[in-house]
Amino acid sequence: MNDTEAMVQAIELAASVRGATSPNPWVGCVIESTDGRVFTGATEPPGGRHAEVVALDAAGDAARGATAWVTLEPCAHIGRTGPCADAMIHAGIARAVIALADPDERVSGQGIARLRDAGVDVSMGEQADAVRTQLAPYLKHRTTGRPWVVLKLGASLDGRTAAPDGTSQWITGGAARADAHMVRAESDAIVVGAGTVRADDPSLTVRHVEGRDPLRVVLGTIPPGAKVAPAVEFRGELPDLLDDLGRRGVLQCLVEGGATVAGAFHRAGLVDHYIFYVAPAIFGGDDARPLFAGPAASTIADVWRGAITGVSHLGGDLRIDVSPITPSPITGPVPVVRLTDEGEPAEAPGIDHPQDRPEGIR
Ligand SMILES: NC(=O)c1ccc[n+]([C@@H]2O[C@H](COP(=O)([O-])OP(=O)(O)OC[C@H]3O[C@@H](n4cnc5c(N)ncnc54)[C@H](OP(=O)(O)O)[C@@H]3O)[C@@H](O)[C@H]2O)c1
């Protein structure tokens, strides 16, 4: 295998366990033995084996003299499992290709140093941008202590989220709802405002798809008997909320509205990724609820601008992914996908339909 092929396979392995490993990173590993046999591994749920160990166990004696491709630097510390760097050395791995160094202070170059000290030939950087995107929530958490914030909203074509009487279920169709539940399953916490709890009485659990229920957080007071209970009630400043969630090991926090909360997160510059589900529906007036409540940019020069990182059809609806335009120190420059007249990506850096989209941000 060449390095690119093998690392792309490792990235796909990591994607297959997205949502099952937090607060640990979702990592993939491919091992090729000297006689060309291929063994693979992906991170197991917390307390289980790391990707490298899964692949080493599968390889057994075939790991001697083999090459290993791994999406994140092997750990060098004893946590709930032994250090993966040591396991690779003991198994006799001769060459290791690693996409990214792990910023976790307990690893941070020590895994690479340990491999090199033991005589393993280590190469860094293969598919690093793709892995940076895939692991953005983990990288942000380990470098800032705060979770990656995804803001999700469902809207009509005229940018409205609820009727004047407060009803909003359901603007979009079943495919968009299932996709939104996938995003929930990949998130460790889900945040809504008390206004949404009062209007919709949502349970905020993962249905429609397999996955763990996130920690549920309500800004404000939960009314008695609300379906969302038990949930964390939070009153205070949003940056403090993110610090608190980070301390709880939340890597990705999904903000699901409503308009007041969406406006507060957006204007505070706390959103790392926006997901808009847009239905071909029109409320047709300005008394329906907007996407964002509160004061807008007061002049065109102050309008927030982002980059579209994905457009996909979900049934009759569209999903539009948008990232802040400033290159993030965590994810780097943002790829832009444009659709052709047929709805296919005109230039595809690999982000279009949900099933093709690199994991990490959905
Ligand atoms: N289409 C969609 O995607 C979507 C998604 C969600 C909701 N909705 C709709 O949106 C409507 C509700 O939106 P909304 O704007 O009325 O309410 P909201 O944004 O859900 O909640 C706002 C409330 O959250 C509480 N809060 C506490 N701390 C806050 C903080 N730091 N920042 C902001 N809010 C804080 C306040 O509650 P207190 O007043 O109790 O202090 C505030 O009134 C409903 O009609 C719902 O159906 C639509």
Image: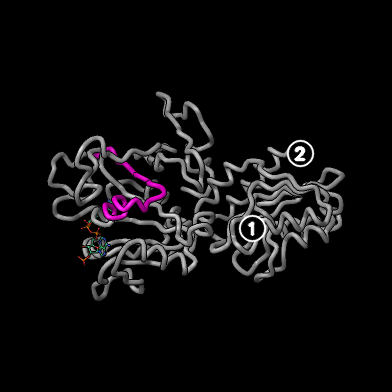
Mark 2 residue type: Met
Q: Please, what secondary structure does the residue beneath circle 2 have?
A: loop
Identified by mark 1, the residue type is: Ser
Image: 357 above or below 360: above
The x and y percentages for residue 153 are 32, 49
Instruction: Name the quarter where the N terminus is drawn.
Output: top right
- Identify the secondary structure beneath mark 1: loop
Q: How many marks?
A: 2
Mark sitting on residue 108: 1
Give residue 361's position: percent from left, percent from top: 48, 48
Q: Nearer the viewer, mark 2 or mark 1?
A: 1
Q: Please state the extent of the stretch shown in magenta in the rendering.
A: 262-281
Q: Residue at x 29, y 68 (%)?
A: 236
Percent from the top left, x then y, of residue 296?
21, 45
As measured in the structure, the alpha-carbon distance from the residue carrying label 2 to the one carrying label 1 is 28 Å
Q: Residue at x 86, y 50 (%)?
A: 65
Reply yes or no: does residue 266 show up in magenta.
yes
Tell whether 172 sits left or right of 107: left
Residue 289 located left or right of residue 103 = left
Extreme residue in the top direction? 341
What label does residue 14 carry, if any? none
Which image quarter: residue 260?
bottom left
In this rendering, the answer to whether 300 lies above or below 122 is: above
Say whether mark 1 is within 8 Å of ligand 1: no
Q: Position of residue 227 (x, y in %)?
A: 31, 69
Determine the residue positioned at 45% across, 60% down. 146
Specify how the rendered protein is coloured: one colour
The residue identified by callout 2 is 1
Q: In the rendered view, tell whether residue 28 sits above or below residue 246.
A: above
| Residue 160 lies in quadrant | top left
Image quarter for ligand 1 equals: bottom left
User: Dot 1, how many residues are within 10 Å of its Cα: few (below 14), some (14-19), or many (20+)?
Assistant: some
